[in-house]
Image: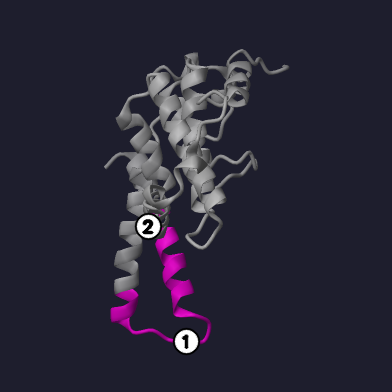
Amino acid sequence: MTSKKVLVERKIKRKVMARVLLSSGIGISITAAVAGMVYAQSVEHFKTMEDKKLERPVNFDSFPAFIRGMNQEPARTDSDNNGLRDDIQLKIAYQYPFDANKRAALIQYYESLIQLLRLNTEMRELKISYGIMQVNKALKCLQSEGVPEDVSLAIKEMALDRDALLVRHDEILAMEPNLPPELFQRRIESDCNLLLQNNEQSLQSWVPND
């Protein structure tokens, strides 16, 4: 077993034991069987999380400075409050380190999914139709920028990585055929978010001050 793998295994065991202790509750004893079950489930959970970590590309050193400056071991959080989950931000950056418009298209798609998840079936039809339209626009932008479907699907799977999120996504999109067609009349605007494109293009040439 390599030293790196040993360190990972130790890290997993430490996290697992912490979870087992927390699951027992203060002053509450749990049986060995329950503790064993929690331990086994936790080991599997943390191994899965380790497996999902993004591998650093072999040409990483040639990447733009803003990508090299990102957290290379991100969590499922938005630590810099830019509206983009850290792990998805890094995934997109690794996918297209030298193509600002493709990155912008994927970010636009992710943001449209998050906006959609904030909706529910009891909201006004106008608001629901707007959310659906933003997803459709993002999909058209991905197509116009030449982003392969498997790449956009990978981002979708990361964004909808909980059963409840996937159910909400499908539930809202399923409403489209029953909504008034006039709500989906196209406005005179680009399918792609020009602000996102400009931002990614600026980042592409950004150089840190030493």
Crowd class of label 2 (few under 14; some 14 to 19; many from 20; radius 10 Å): few
Which image quarter holds the N terminus?
A: top left
Crowd class of label 1 (few under 14; some 14 to 19; many from 20; radius 10 Å): few
Query: Which amino acid type is marked by label 1?
Result: Ile
Residue 138's label in the rendered image is none
Question: What residue appears at the point 55 percent right and 35 percent down from the top-left corner?
Answer: 71
SS for callout 2: helix
81 shown above or below 107: below
Give residue 162's position: percent from left, percent from top: 39, 56
Query: Which amino acid type is marked by label 2?
Result: Val
Spot the residue most to the bottom. 28
On screen, residue 19 versus residue 66, left or right, reads: left
Which image quarter holds the C terminus?
A: top right
Q: Number of marks in the image? A: 2
Mark closest to the chain's N terminus, 1 or 2: 1
Give residue 180's position: percent from left, percent from top: 46, 47
Give residue 70's position: percent from left, percent from top: 56, 31
Determine if residue 53 is in view: no
Question: What residue appears at the point 51 percent right and 43 percent down from the top-left corner?
Answer: 183
Magenta stretch bounds: 11-36
Residue 167's label in the rendered image is 2
> Can you identify the residue that label 1 sits on?
28
Magenta residue check for 27: yes
Question: What residue appears at the point 51 percent right and 50 percent down from the top-left corner?
Answer: 128
**Secondary structure that dominates the magenta span:** helix
Judge by depth and name the residue closer to the eye, 116 or 205: 116
Judge by depth and name the residue closer to the eye, 65 or 33: 65
136 shown above or below 105: below
